[in-house]
Image: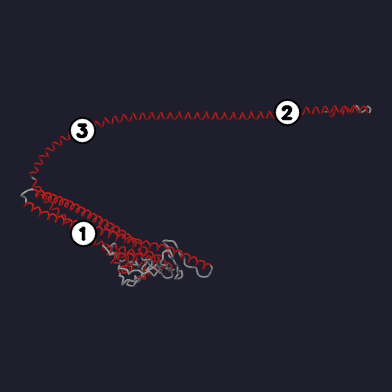
Amino acid sequence: MQKKRVAKVKRAKAGKGKKDGKQETKAVKESDVEKAKAAAALWELRLRVTDTSLVEYREASRRLARANEELTDRLYRAEQDAIDITGFLSRQDAAKEKKINVLQKSLKAQEELARKEQKKVVEDYTKQINEMKELFTKKSSDFDMIQDGMKTIKEFQKRKSQMEQELIDIRENMDAADKDHREKLNILEQNFFLEKIRLEREAEKTIALVEEKAHVEAIVQLDDASRSVFKENVRLNEALKYHIKESELLQMLANSMEKEKASLALDKNTLELMVKKNAAQMQAQNQELSKLRAKVTYLEQALELKEEGPGRGGEKEKTLVSIPAGQVELEELRRVLSMRERELGNVKRLASGIVQQRTEMERFFHEALAQVKEEITATRSQYKKEALQAYHRRLREATAGKQKFPPIRTFRKGPHSTNSVYSDMEAAARWTHQPGSQVEVTDLTWEQKEQVLRLLFAKMNGQKERKASRHPASPASSEMKKLIDSDAAGSMMTRKALQPSGSSASIPARLPVAQSMAASGGVEDWHVRRQRQQTVQTRFIPQMSFPQNRAVFLWSGKKKKKKYTPLNGFL
């Protein structure tokens, strides 16, 4: 609008003179500029006021919105609280109503139960009254019956002797019939058992023939691998039987040790009773001795009194004669008492010696057996480790193409393993020596030495030998028996075999084991017991031997310094 007005003014004044026109134009321009500045300032002021009011409006709107939101939230929470409170109160009222109903029902039930109990009590007491009446009636009838019975008893007493004789005759007849019946029954049972045994034997023979025939046919039809598996199964079955018998032997050994313990306890109780008896005898003798001393004192006093009185010469002589007799009797009693004390001391020493010898023997054998078990465990672990290393070495060489792959070998116990390292360990426990051959301790494995020690335990406890089984290793028991029962001259357990390898220490000659076992129950000389202790404590030369194509290891005699020497190639 300002620009349009300025243009109109310029056109209106265009026809005037140049000077007037210039002055008017300049004045108009200045006035327009001032107006424009004023308008701009005004509009700027209005804009600022508008912006300020807009900001304030926005702030007020935000405050109102926040206040509205807070009020809405409060209203929502208040409504929610009111709803929750109302629901809670309604649930509480419902629960109270339900509880009231339950209590009312319970009250009714209790009332009904009380009525029933009252009725039942009335019925029970009525019933008891009726029963008491019936019992009274019954007792009255019983009393009448007793009276009748008394009459009958009186009549029976009159016929008692006759009935007793008849009863004796009946018993004799019954005994005779019973005896005949038992004899017939025994004959029938004997015939039945004989027939049963005959039938069982025939059945066993038939089964054995069928099994043998099937066994032969199966072996003929099997190939080489199956035959080897079958042979391995047979060997494992035999080994299982052997181990089962070994466990039975250990159980028998434990039972014998328990019996020995019980016998020692009985001996101890017997010795204690003897000690108590001797103590009682000593006490009785002491009492008798005190009585004799009192008697001697009394006689001395009487003698003094008699010496003071006149006319007592004869009594004085009698007293003088009786005093030496009492002293002699007193000395005799003292001597008997000292002998009893010495006997009691000997009994005590004997008992302590027996207990000490038995304890030492058991301790030494337990130590030897524990050492052998430790050596078995250590040797087996070392053998397993070395066998595993050799097997891995051969596998590496076979992988590199230097040799053929070895057969598969297992190092864990398994029911179907045909080539296990544990079969070598089991083979070490078998008795490989021929019957009647000379055997040295150095030729035995640790497992065989353990068997020798266990047989020593059995002989020490008086255990009976087991019957020879059909196991392939059965000659071991007879050979170990010969090895144990042999004396120092005929046995191959010389000092050279008993001392550790590399040791030059001298070992005393070994006593016969049977002699030492026989002497274990009595009093032994100290030197004899010492020699037996040294024999038990002597280290064996450990040596493990396995079948051919198996790794064989030698160990030094010292326990913690082991030396491994492969004798044969693995597998």
The N terminus appears in which quarter of the rendering?
top right
| Residue 147: x %, y % from top left | 12, 37
Gap in Å between the C-alphas at discs 3 and 2? 118 Å
Q: Which residue is mark 2?
A: 50
Amino acid type at circle 3 is Met
Q: Nearer the viewer, mark 1 or mark 3?
A: 3
Q: Quadrant of residue 116?
A: top left
At horizontal 45% and vertical 29% (from top left) the residue drawn is 94
Label 2 CA crowd tier, 10 Å (few <14, some 14–19, many 20+): few
Residue 132 - label: 3
Q: Are marks 1 and 3 in contact (CB under 8 Å)?
A: no
Gap in Å between the C-alphas at discs 2 and 1? 137 Å
Front residue of 71 and 430: 430
Amino acid type at circle 2 is Thr
Disc 2, SS? helix
Amino acid type at circle 1 is Leu
Residue 188 - label: 1
Disc 3, SS? helix
